[in-house]
Image (spheres, rainbow, N blue to C red):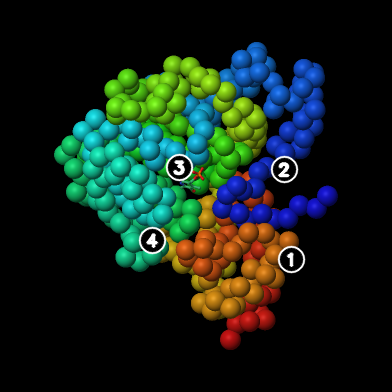
Amino acid sequence: MSRVFNFSAGPAVLPEEVLKEAAEEMMDYRGCGMSVMEMSHRSKMFQTIIGEAEADLRELMGIPDNYKVLFLQGGASQQFAMIPMNLFKNRVGDFIITGQWAKKAYQEASLYGKANAVASSADKTFSYIPDVSDLPISEDADYVYICENNTIYGTKYKTLPDTKGKTLVADLSSCFLSEPVDVSKYGLIFAGAQKNVGPAGVVIVIIREDLISEEVLPGTPTMLRYKTHADAVSLYNTPPAYGIYICGKVFQWLKKLGGLNAMKEINEKKAALLYDFLDQSKLFKGTVVKEDRSLMNVPFITGDEALDELFVKESRAAGFENLKGHRTVGGMRASIYNAMPTEGVEKLVAFMKDFEEKHAK
Ligand SMILES: *Cc1c(COP(=O)(O)O)cnc(C)c1O
């Protein structure tokens, strides 16, 4: 067996320990004679799996008791619609546009009411986070929306916006569980699992209870109401059971590692290896302003498209997968999520040094 270093932005690398455990339990989960994939979601065994997953997530993030944790489907993108459908009372949302995912959420919300772009970093290809200390928040805004870590552009909020008392809604898909989060500052957090937690097909929603109500936009399908899933503890219908089981294993892995403070420390060291190299390189250059750099997604370029292409090709041959930048940005992007071992980044930097020696003018 040979595993590559997978720098994919998502679906992305998972902890090897988790994959091995899942493999061992594939045919016979803890003596029940079947795989988790084959088991009733109403069974006692699965109730334990989802119950423990939620409890571990609550412990890891310190989620207050007045928040619900929901394991849903439809990916992060479905939340772009579900949020306005459930949270629009005045039908007004204020959006900070820091990249494609924020923009998609903004466009989707505008199908249901008034979506305001209160700040944007589109002027410089989303290479920074706008000043969010004094935004023109709408008086009647139902919420203020951010994408906290911008997967495509490699930026991350270091301070949350001043929402002037309005509910903060945040897409944490690509930084979920990468560091501690003060959940009480948000009304709603959501994250697609496939970036930092588990397989595609699960989206985790953490929502303050007072935001869950029967009052939703007319025509909102039962399946797209938070109340449906909160009342049924994520078991209204068949949930993405196998995915939830893997997420649970990743939560366990994080707990064993020492929790989110320990994870953050590892992530900072790991990212510094790459950023420190980029900062002194004669060939490679990071594309994001220093103070807004993501710990998870690191875009970089050589400034020469042909050379970028050669780099991606040669890196692939050397066992580094998915370093090609997003199709809208070009260049390269190394996604170094929680499960990317430090060794992977060390080896990537060594490979980049070699490449630089051969190609720097
Ligand atoms: C990947 C990603 C999405 C989209 O996720 P899907 O599960 O494919 O819908 C949304 N937001 C962010 C920040 C992402 O990284």
Disc 2 marks which residue? Answer: 16
Q: Is residue 105 above or below residue 22?
A: below
Of the residues shown, which amino acid type is indicated by label 3?
Answer: Ser
Q: Is residue 100 left or right of residue 285?
A: left
The answer to which of marks 2 and 1 sits earlier in the sequence is 2
Of residues 327 and 140, the one nearer the viewer is: 327
How many numbered dots are placed on residues in this image? 4
In the picture as drawn, the residue positioned furthest to the top comes out as 44
Disc 3 marks which residue? Answer: 77
Q: Secondary structure at mark 3?
A: helix
Give the label on residue 126, or none.
Answer: 4
The crowding category of the residue bearing disc 3, from other C-alpha atoms within 10 Å (few below 14, some 14 to 19, many at least 20), is some
Residue 69 in picture, x, y percent from top left: 47, 26
The crowding category of the residue bearing disc 1, from other C-alpha atoms within 10 Å (few below 14, some 14 to 19, many at least 20), is few
The answer to which of marks 1 and 4 sits earlier in the sequence is 4
Does mark 4's beta carbon lie closer than 8 Å to ligand 1? no
Q: Is residue 155 left or right of residue 319?
A: left
In the picture as drawn, the residue positioned furthest to the front comes out as 219
Residue 105 in picture, x, y percent from top left: 37, 45
Q: Is residue 124 above or below residue 203?
A: below
Gap in Å between the C-alphas at discs 1 and 4? 31 Å
Frontmost of labels 1 and 3 is: 3
The answer to which of marks 4 and 3 sits earlier in the sequence is 3
Q: Are marks 4 and 2 in contact (CB under 8 Å)?
A: no
Gap in Å between the C-alphas at discs 1 and 3? 34 Å
